Amino acid sequence: MNENLFLSCRTTLLLLSISCFNISCNAKNNKKEPSITTQNIDSTILFETDEEISFLFMGDFMQHSPQIKAAKDSIGNYNYEHYFEYTNSLINNVDFAIANLEVTLAGEPYDGYPRFSSPDEYVVAIQNAGFDVLATSNNHSNDCGSSGLARTINVLDSLKFMHLGTYKDSIERINNYPLIIKKNGIKVALLNYTYGTNGLDTKHPNIVNMIDEEIILQDIQIARDSNIDKIIVITHWGGEYRSFPDEYQKKWGEWLLSNGADIVIGGHPHWVQPAEYRKDSLDNERIIIWSLGNIVSNQRSSIMKMEHTDGGSSLQFTLYRDSTGEVKFKNIGYHLHWVWLHNKDNRKRYQILPISKSEKIILDMDERSKKELKRFIDNERSLYLQNNINVPEFQYNLKSDSYYLE
């Protein structure tokens, strides 16, 4: 294609885009800007327009008792900002960063497993780190009863932090679910469900979204009626401490992909499980990642059960609208990240360390940590290299402090 024709097409296709959400939020100034490129598919020139939106999905935000204790300073304040010292470019180079909040914000007394109640400062730090949306439907949603569920929602709302999965009543759910986000002309519906709540009943009129065929089909239809481009389902499911999906995950994962979900994001096993990008002969595209593992937790031990819990993965991808009007995937890949637990300034520190970045920077790390980090990298990278389908690893560029796919 000659330069003049390209410039003419570029001028014609550029549109003024308005970012909007069904919940008001402020856009980050440091989010990446879209661009126009061309690609040749089957001898037909298709343009990628300025209509695109990028996502990063991370796993479970845990908060065990040792984490709460370590975050408390000498005058009784809680601080978690150091968790994210190494993650700025990982989280903020996408339009929307989304994760699972596997704790309640039920107020004092704070506690970890088995009934999680975390300081509000925890979610403030998560938001300050660049996260845009939190899923709250998981097996710990009812840990602190109706008051804990309601207070979690109230805190998130007070921060104007978008969330989905649990609701104080049916009216709130009708008004806010599915969570629909829109940017640069692309409209996406987010859905969130859990397999259960550890035997703790959801008290009326509260709602915790459960994995249920009839309910999910109704929600998918509501999303479709909103003229969305893609449906993303965040699921809390499966047996814990496994590297591969169990039969329950496989059953529901395939059912979701067959009944309207374009992307399925799994969590709960606390270990990472493979990711798949599927494209059939009709150019239908689907993505599923069976489990993202932990973002941060105190789950770590030399025993085999906990050998994979000291880190997790994240899935990154971009949706774009081509010149035919169809929304497609590009730049699909994963990141691995490990929880570096160490002492700094006479205090215990939990820090999320992106793996590809850790391999390019100099860290003052003791020999035990180096050994644990190497074990995590060897285990999880080999799992993904051998079992992922068309989902490669993002690499880190030290000079530009950014990530790229080879």
Image (cartoon, grey):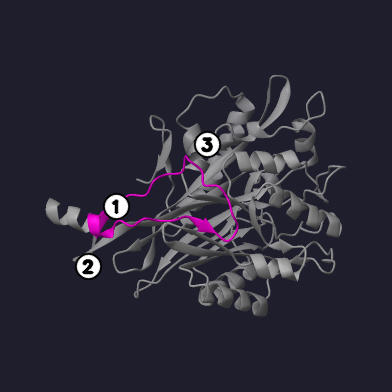
Report if residue 301 is visible in the image: no
Q: Look at the image and tell me in which quarter the N terminus lies.
A: bottom left
Q: Residue 314: horizontal and vertical position, in percent?
A: 54, 49
Horizontally, residue 162 falls left or right of residue 96, namely right
Closer to the eye: label 1 or 2: 1
Q: Nearer the viewer, residue 278 or 147?
A: 147
Q: Residue 296: horizontal and vertical position, in percent?
A: 66, 42
Residue type, mark 1 in image: Ile
Q: Main secondary structure of the magenta part?
A: loop
Within 10 Å of disc 2 (Cα), the crowding (few <14, some 14-19, many 20+) is few
Q: Residue 78: horizontal and vertical position, in percent?
A: 76, 33
Q: Look at the image and tell me in which quarter the C terminus lies.
A: top left
Name the residue that disc number 2 marks. 42
* 387 relative to 283, above or below: above
Q: Nearer the viewer, residue 164 or 211?
A: 164
Report if residue 22 is visible in the image: yes
Alpha carbon of mark 1 to alpha carbon of mark 2: how far? 20 Å
At a point 34% along the width and 74% down the height, the residue shown is 281
- Looking at the rendering, which quadrant does residue 238 occupy? bottom right
Q: Which residues are magenta?
A: 11-39
Name the residue that disc number 3 marks. 88
* 65 relative to 288, above or below: above
Q: Which mark is residue 36?
A: 1
Residue type, mark 2 in image: Asp
Alpha carbon of mark 1 to alpha carbon of mark 3: how far? 25 Å
Horizontally, residue 195 falls left or right of residue 367, namely right
Residue type, mark 3 in image: Asn
Q: Secondary structure at mark 1?
A: loop
* 121 relative to 272, above or below: above
Q: Secondary structure at mark 2?
A: loop
